[in-house]
Amino acid sequence: MPSCFRFSLSSDVTPPNIRTMASVNTTQFRPAQRVANQKQDVWSIVNEAAAASPVQPIVNMGQGFFGYNPPQFVIDAAKSVFDRVDCNQYAPTKGRPRLKKAIADAYSKFYGKTLDPNKEVTITTGANEGMLSAFMGFIEPGDEVIVFEPFFDQYISNIEMAGGKVVYVPLQAPKNGDTQNSQAADWTLELEHFRAAITPNTRMIVLNTPHNPIGKVFTKDELQAIADICVEKKILILSDEVYDTLYYVPFTRIATLSPEVASITLTVGSAGKNFYATGWRVGWLIGPEHLIKYVSAAHTRICYSSVSPLQEATAIAFEQADQYNFWEESKREMKAKMDKFNTIWGELGLPYSDPQGGYFVLVNMSKIKLPEDYTFPPHVADRPRDFKLSWFLIMELGVAAIPPTEFVSDANAYIAESYLRFAVCKNDDVLETAQERLRGLKKYIQE
């Protein structure tokens, strides 16, 4: 062996090829600020608690995934596409033509005009990536985005990923929500707070109706007041309407108010919510060409194109939905589940906010007295009361629910810290098991 390649195992010099990873200084790998200081997210906290709970199996009413399959015609649509070569290859970046046309056909009747599938619709990898694409398409570092709280937590990270600054405007909670039942409509936006939050840097607002987690459906008058301000101030509207087929009171789409409002509005939709298939990750945005083209451009750079076969299956599901009366049936079934499950709160004397849409219900837990000596892990102990309530229900009753302070800013945690969010999109036997277990709260209730 040439002398330049000789080494001794007893030498103090360790050759690079046998160094251990332990010798690597991991502090040199500095994470980006956007992810460096994030708290453990609510989803992992709840799922870890569920796995560790002594009460098994857990009744999971936390995350909003369906406890049952899509209807058979949707399943059949999915099965039918996998034998097609074109469906197993890249979809066009803006979406498969059949799906864009199916969405344009389905929504044209709401918009009162014929939507152009090639200019006014773009397909995304779920609604969440669609919203990220909208932020990436229009938000520059330093731009401000107004978010009404409570909010879906992904809004915040998506805005910040784009370099935007989140400006929070709280919805006002029902005044007597801790002592009596209320309506989701009782959560109200004070327009003066909204106006006061607008600055020269305000670029966009995020609206969610039907609302997660509240279940509020904004009225036409409320939407008109918001839209008038946005038109006046030249602010874009990103309207998250993923629960747009699950409404139990009259529902208005903000983009349909006027041509002026439509010209500044991007509307977000979700096949996962529409067809009970949250794992499909098929979403879309509808809007005028002068907005949609930039969303499409950002989407292309984020993930290029979205899952091709499930796009085609979603198109078929849209085409066949009416012949199965699917939209009305799904609304009726979900409302029945909501009414069925919520009878437990009357039995326990715990007030709740009756939803107008979607499949979540907020329940006020102010009357629950947690044992003073109860031990919570550090990552729960330093969170607001609703995290403790969630942990307690999982560990003691085997029922998982989401603490909604995850959906408000720290400064406004008081809005939500007495509530828990329950998802009712589960089989009826699961709802009944949850009710039975929740009766275990009786001994902790203090009037």
Image: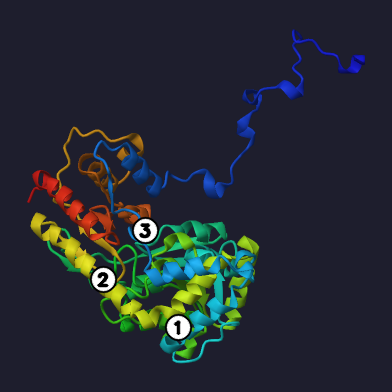
- Camera-side mark, 2 or 3: 2
- In-front residue for pair 397/383: 397
The secondary element bearing badge 1 is classed as: helix
Q: Going by the image, does 244 lie left or right of 347? A: right
Identify the residue under disc 3: 65
The residue shown at (48%, 88%) is: 260
The secondary element bearing badge 3 is classed as: loop
Q: Which quadrant of the structure image shows residue 348?
A: bottom left
Identify the residue under disc 2: 333
Identify the residue under disc 1: 106
Above or below, comparing residue 166 to residue 15 in the picture = below
- The circle drawn on residue 364 is none
Residue 430 % position (x, y): 24, 55
Mark 1 residue crowding within 10 angstroms, few (<14) / some (14–19) / many (20+):
some
Residue 369 % position (x, y): 14, 44
The residue shown at (72%, 21%) is: 18
Q: Going by the image, does 431 lie left or right of 39? A: left
Q: Going by the image, does 137 lie left or right of 193? A: right
The secondary element bearing badge 2 is classed as: helix
Quadrant location of the N terminus in the rendered image: top right
Q: Residue furthest bottom?
A: 113
How far apart, in angstroms, are the residues tagged by discs 3 and 1?
A: 24 Å
Above or below, comparing residue 143 to residue 114 in the picture = above
Lower position in the chain sequence, tag 2 or tag 1: 1
Q: Residue furthest top?
A: 10
How far apart, in angstroms, are the residues tagged by discs 2 and 1?
A: 21 Å
Is residue 247 in view from this perspective? no
Q: Residue furthest left?
A: 447
